[in-house]
Amino acid sequence: MQTGRNSSDRNGTNAPSEYLTFTLGNEEYGIDILKVQEIRGYDPVTHIANAPEFIKGVINLRGVIVPIVDMRIKFKVGEPTYHEFTVVIIMNVLGRIIGMVVDGVSDVVALKAEQIKPAPEMGAALNTDYITGLGTVDDQMLILVDIEKLMSSEEMQVMDQSI
């Protein structure tokens, strides 16, 4: 007969969380796989006047106008280039569809709670509220990002603050 603890384990409370991993510069990041709608190549965008530099513009994705955010510019990880290998992660964030340009998509990894360490405090000089923790897979470290917090942050200006 199973105890209450074992039955809660069976119900998924200790189940690993899955993250889509992607690269920006030399770093690996992870976002909740459940937020990802699709992965596609970079298509030319329609630029929006007076948008912040990291908002490349918008695309029409099957009738939905999708803002495209270049995380390489936002996180200042070198000069972005756009070619046939540039990847856009299409996500459903807070009920809106957003595209995120990254250097490349790596894998989907499952992380157990013991593989995730809390994000270090960086002080007021650097806003890291969107970093949920640091995951480790073998010798690789992943920066785990709460994409909803990042996209709805005041500095990103991508999401309606009232949502």
Image (cartoon, rainbow, N blue to C red):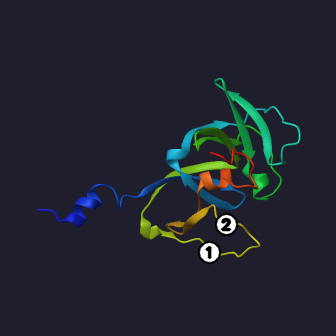
Can you name the residue that lies furthest to the front here? 162
From where the camera sits, is residue 130 visible? yes
Q: Residue at x 64, y 75 (%)?
A: 121
Helix, strand or loop status at disc 2: loop
N-term mark: 2 or 1: 1
Residue located 17% across and 65% down the image: 3
Q: Quadrant of the image for the C terminus?
A: top right
Marking on residue 38: none
Picture quadrant where residue 1 is located: bottom left
Type of amino acid at the residue the image marks with label 1:
Pro
Q: Quadrant of residue 68?
A: top right
Give the camera-side residue of 53 and 83.
Answer: 53
Residue 21 drawn at (x, y percent): 57, 53
Q: Is mark 1 on a helix, strand or loop?
A: loop
- Let me know if residue 142 appears in the view: no
Dots 2, 1 in contact, CB < 8 A: yes
**Left or right: 156 with respect to 23?**
right
Coordinates of residue 135 in the picture (x, y in percent): 53, 66
Determine which residue is flagged by label 1: 120
Three-letter code for the amino acid on which mark 2 is drawn? Thr
Which residue is located at x 84 percent, y 48 percent?
53
Numbered tag placed on residue 128 in the rendering: 2
Residue furthest to the top = 63
Find residue 71 and report its horizontal and vertical position in percent.
Answer: 73, 51
Q: Residues within 10 Å of mark 2 (few under 14, many from 20)?
A: some
Judging depth in this view, the residue of 91 and 135 nearest the camera is 91
